[in-house]
Image: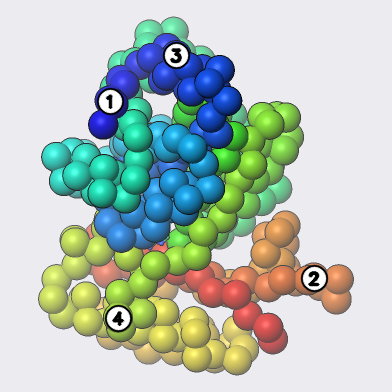
Amino acid sequence: MTIVTTPAAARALSERWRRAGLRVGMVPTMGALHEGHASLIRRAARECDRVVASIFVNPKQFGPKEDYARYPRTFPADRRLCEKAGADAIYLPSVAGMYPPGFATTVRVGGVSEPLEGRSRPGHFDGVATVVAKLLAAARPDRAYFGEKDFQQLAVVRRLAADLDLGVTIVGCPIVREKDGLALSSRNRYLSPEERERASLISKALRSSSSLASAKKMMLAIPGAKVDYVALVDAETFAPPTGATRRRRLLAAVRFGKTRLIDNVGVSW
Ligand code: AMP
């Protein structure tokens, strides 16, 4: 397993691969890796000749009251998971290396980044778009893999890659869930046993509803949960669905104490 820690080293590694005619896949993560991340790496390994997973807890995508400081950092286990899932390299940049003194650029994606997560977490998607642009610029993958777990983030990244002519194919991957339906998340470990049990009701509400009203009603009935939003949007534009909408997505964000969980499903109604 090769580990590179600077943008220049990530660039050199990927250039070496590409000069040898190898297709490069990238899986950007914040670490605390689980089966959801592993599914992305395995998919990348199937579709590409070399895979680099990045691990970077990006301070720019956390709000001042969010969990940046306590976000789990589990590098030894992450490294083993990357290896087992088929990654060839880990790109592990430092905060100072990514954002050296004088760093002054913000990448802002309009439209899709504005509602829902964009409204609840001001600045979040600017942080995401900025770091993803930097990661893709350093590693120059042919394909980059993102989970539908963060469905709006996936839409933001697709827009970013298209608008900036990055020449990378963005691949969206299905959500990996626990047996009871809870979407795997690095933040699930914050939940108390009681909250963990109740958290499975989020996906149940999304998956068993046949209208936005019923999804909201079920979500609001989850004991101990504070509902941030439940929304139905056009899966491409994130605007309210219209007659012309081809795919609809039902999304929710729910808090248990300080822990904020998100989930979403495709719906045909
Ligand atoms: P994170 O480390 O939370 O920033 O996530 C890194 C990537 O893994 C993102 O593209 C996420 O959407 C994806 N991911 C996280 N959890 C899951 C999951 N349960 N299923 C599929 N992909 C996931």
Q: Which residue is mark 1?
A: 3
Most foreground residue, 175 or 87: 87
Q: Looking at the picture, how far across and down is residue 209, in whole percent?
A: 54, 90
Inter-mark Cα distance, 3 to 2 = 43 Å
Q: Quadrant of the N terminus?
A: top left
Question: Viewer-nearest of labels 4 and 2?
Answer: 4
Q: Earlier in the sequence, mark 3 or mark 2?
A: 3
Inter-mark Cα distance, 4 to 2 = 32 Å
The quarter of the picture where residue 226 lies is: bottom left
Classed neighbour count for the residue bearing mark 1: other residues with Cα under 10 Å, few (<14), some (14–19), many (≥20): some
Looking at the image, residue 21 sits to the left or right of residue 239; the answer is: left
Q: Looking at the picture, how far across and down is residue 258, in whole percent?
A: 25, 60
Most foreground residue, 220 or 71: 71
Question: Viewer-nearest of labels 4 and 1?
Answer: 1
Taking the spot 27% from the left edge, 69% from the top edge, the residue there is 256
Q: Which residue is mark 2?
A: 245
Q: Quadrant of ligand 1?
A: bottom left
Taking the spot 32% from the left edge, 65% from the top edge, the residue there is 184
Q: Earlier in the sequence, mark 4 or mark 2?
A: 4
Q: Which residue is mark 3?
A: 12
Q: Looking at the picture, how far across and down is residue 250, in whole percent?
A: 58, 74
Amino acid on which the number 4 mark rests in the picture: Lys
Amino acid on which the number 2 mark rests in the picture: Thr
Taking the spot 61% from the left edge, 45% from the top edge, the residue there is 170
